[in-house]
Image (cartoon, rainbow, N blue to C red):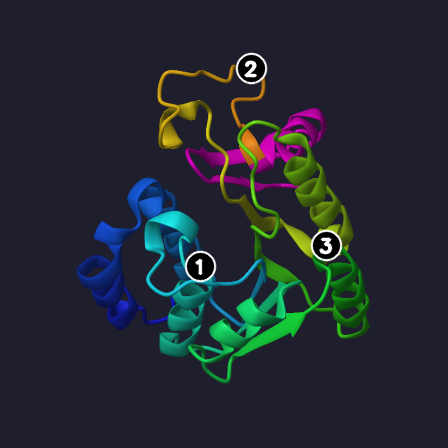
Amino acid sequence: MPESIQFWEFFNQQVSSKLGVRTNTFRQIFKFLDRIDGRLNIIETGCARLKDNWQGDGQSTLLFDKYISLRSLPAKLYSVDINQTSIDYARSLVGSKTTLTQADSVKYLNQLTREFEKTNDTVDLLYLDSFDLDTTYWYPSAAHHLKELCAAMRMLRKDSLVVVDDCPLTADFVPGLQNQINFVTPPMVGGKGRLVAEYAAAIGATLVFSEYQAGWTNF
């Protein structure tokens, strides 16, 4: 397996305590990536936008870039965001293995799929986090992330991991709303991932984890 000792030292010593409700699931994501023995492709929608906003946004762009920069085998991160200011900020923090593109994420994923098909390439991790969650009306964000999944579907293998951020089961994760419960059963995934979860359950995809972030294989 690829050498990742340096990354895990960085993760455990510098950032895991800052990630809050995402700590465990990010740990599972990187353990999954460690098992891939070969070229690695990560696609992310929605990039890092605020300095040190670990608990708020998760800073996934920085984490993925750090991981691939320390990986001993070839790896690439493709990240898209509709906001140019966010792209400019993230670009100032990442290395040459990361490509940042300002575009609508659904259109971008559709185009990237065509490019991947030309080279028979696939994605190992698809991380969806481009549309902010409105905790009072979850549908627009959830619908957008389902569209992203559809646009990227042909890049996935059975063992590719698809992760959606901001999938709280209850309002316990939302400051100021701790006593307001949002019942989502089935599936036991809310927020941005609610419609992805319904689709996943309908086709028999495998739910790998379901906390503040939800992840599946076998799409």
Q: Which circle marks residue 152 in the picture?
A: 3
SS of the residue at dot 1?
Answer: helix
x, y (%) of residue 65? 44, 71
Residue ID for mark 2? 185
- Residue type beneath disc 1: Ser
Can you give x and y, in whole percent of width and height, for residue 28 in the image? 38, 47
Q: Residue at x 67, y 31 (%)?
A: 139
Question: Which residue is at a point 34% across and 49% down the rendered structure image?
Answer: 55
Q: Is residue 4 above or below residue 212?
A: below
For the point 33% across and 40% down, the residue is: 21
Which residue occupies the foreground of this view, 134 or 154? 134
In space, the residues marked 3 and 1 are separated at their CA atoms by: 19 Å
Q: Which residues are magenta?
A: 192-219
Q: Nearer the viewer, mark 3 or mark 1?
A: 1
Q: Is residue 206 visible?
A: no
Judging from the image, what secondary structure is the residue with disc 3 in?
helix
| Viewer-closest of 92 and 114 | 92
Residue 35 x/y as whole percent: 42, 58
Q: Amino acid at mark 2?
A: Thr
Tell me where residue 116 sits by quadrant. bottom right
What amino acid is at disc 3? Ala
Element assignment for label 2: loop
